[in-house]
Amino acid sequence: MSNHLPLFSGSKVDFPDWQDAIIQGAADASIQHPLGLRGFLLPAEEYSTLDNTPFIPVPNPGPLLDHPNTADGQRAAKTWKRMKEEYLAQQQDLLLFTKEFTRSLPAEIQRLLIHPNRGATYTLAQRYAILVSDFGTLTAGDIKAIQDRCS
C-alpha cells in the first residue's frame, strides 16, 4: 500500500499531475486485484479502457453457512474463509487508500467532500468525481493565467 500520495495544491493547474499520481496510487494500493483499487476510483467507462473488462471487486461471501463435518463441508468452509480474507483485505486497502486520498487534499477541499446531510459518506469514486468536476476542466481564464505565468 502506497502512502506517498502528493498533496494537492487546490489549483486547477496542478490537478492533472495530482490526478495522475492518484490514479497510479490507486493502482498500487491493493494486491487483491490486478489493477489495484482503480475500479473503486474511476468511472466504469474509464476503468474498462484499462484492460477492456469491467471492474469486479472481491465479493463479500456473506456469513459462514453451517457445513456438515464432512470433506465437502470442510472444503466449503475453507473456500469461504479464503474468500472472506480476500474481501476483508480489499476493504482494508480501500479504507486506507481513501484516508490517504483525503489527507492529500487541502482542508478547504476536504470540507467540500463531506455530504451536507449525512457527513463524510461519499464513496471514493464520488469524492474523485467531485474533484474531477471542480478541477479537471481548465477554463479559458485558467489557460490564460498559465500562459501569463509561463511568459
Image: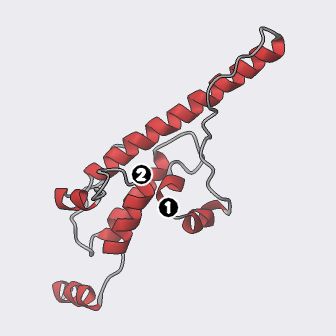
**Which residue is pictured at 49% across the width and 61% down the height?**
42
Residue 72 at x, y percent in the picture = 82, 17
Q: Which residue is drawn at 52% across and 64% down?
A: 43
The answer to whether 141 is drawn above or below residue 128 in the figure is below
**Residue holding disc 1:** 42
State which tag comes first along the sequence, 1 or 2. Answer: 2
Tell me if residue 149 comes above or below residue 51 in the rendering: below
Specify whether 38 is left or right of 130: right
Please state if 87 lies on the left or on the right of 94 as rendered.
right
- Residue 103 visible? The answer is yes
Which residue in the protein does label 2 denote?
Answer: 25
Residue at image coords 61%, 41%? 58
Measured as percent of width and height from the top left, residue 88 is found at 52, 32
Question: Mark 2 packing: few (<14 Cα in 10 Å), some, or many (20+)?
Answer: many
In percent of width and height, residue 51 lies at 65, 60
Q: Which amino acid does label 1 sit on?
A: Leu
Q: Where's the N terminus, which quadrant? A: top left
- Look at the picture and state if 61 lies above or below 136: above
